[in-house]
Image (tube, helix red, strand yellow):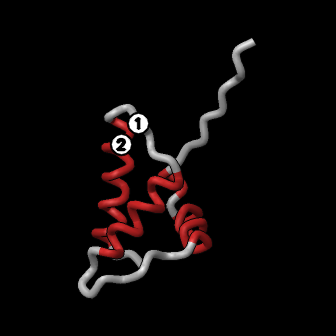
């Protein structure tokens, strides 16, 4: 569904967000993919959440879960 250039743009978005100190949540990346698809010629509709989950399985390096301990 995404071209190689679009996948590279998503990776760049995640990296830029990380370097600015914001990080990137799954919902942020999902919204970015929807934005990229909307800018296609002709515009395409955003993929489903299920497609996005499969995309993350193919590209596991996009996210790393960080778990913190609650402060006592």
* Along the viewing direction, whichever of 35 and 23 lies nearer the viewer: 35
Residue shown at 60% from the left, 35% from the top: 66
Q: Position of residue 45 (x, y in %)?
A: 42, 81
Position of the C terminus by quadrant: top right
Image-quadrant location for residue 6: bottom left
Q: Position of residue 44 (x, y in %)?
A: 36, 83
Answer whether labels 1 and 2 touch (C-beta < 8 Å): yes
Whole-number angstrom distance, CA of label 1 to CA of label 2: 5 Å
Q: How many marks?
A: 2
Would residue 16 be found to the left or right of residue 68 on screen?
A: left
Position of the N terminus by quadrant: bottom left
Would residue 71 be found to the left or right of residue 61 on screen?
A: right
Q: Residues within 10 Å of mark 1 (few under 14, many from 20)?
A: few
Residue shown at 39% from the left, 75% from the top: 2
Residue shown at 70% from the left, 15% from the top: 71
Q: Which mark is residue 22?
A: 1
Residue tagged by mark 2? 17
């Amino acid at each position: 569904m995404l071209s190689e250039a679009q996948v590279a743009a998503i990776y760049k978005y995640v990296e830029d967000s990380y370097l600015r100190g914001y990080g990137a949540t799954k919902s942020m990346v999902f919204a970015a993919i929807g934005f990229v698809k909307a800018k296609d010629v002709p515009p395409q509709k955003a993929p489903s959440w299920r497609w996005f989950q499969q995309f993350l399985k193919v590209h596991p390096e996009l996210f790393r879960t960080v778990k913190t301990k609650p402060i006592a």
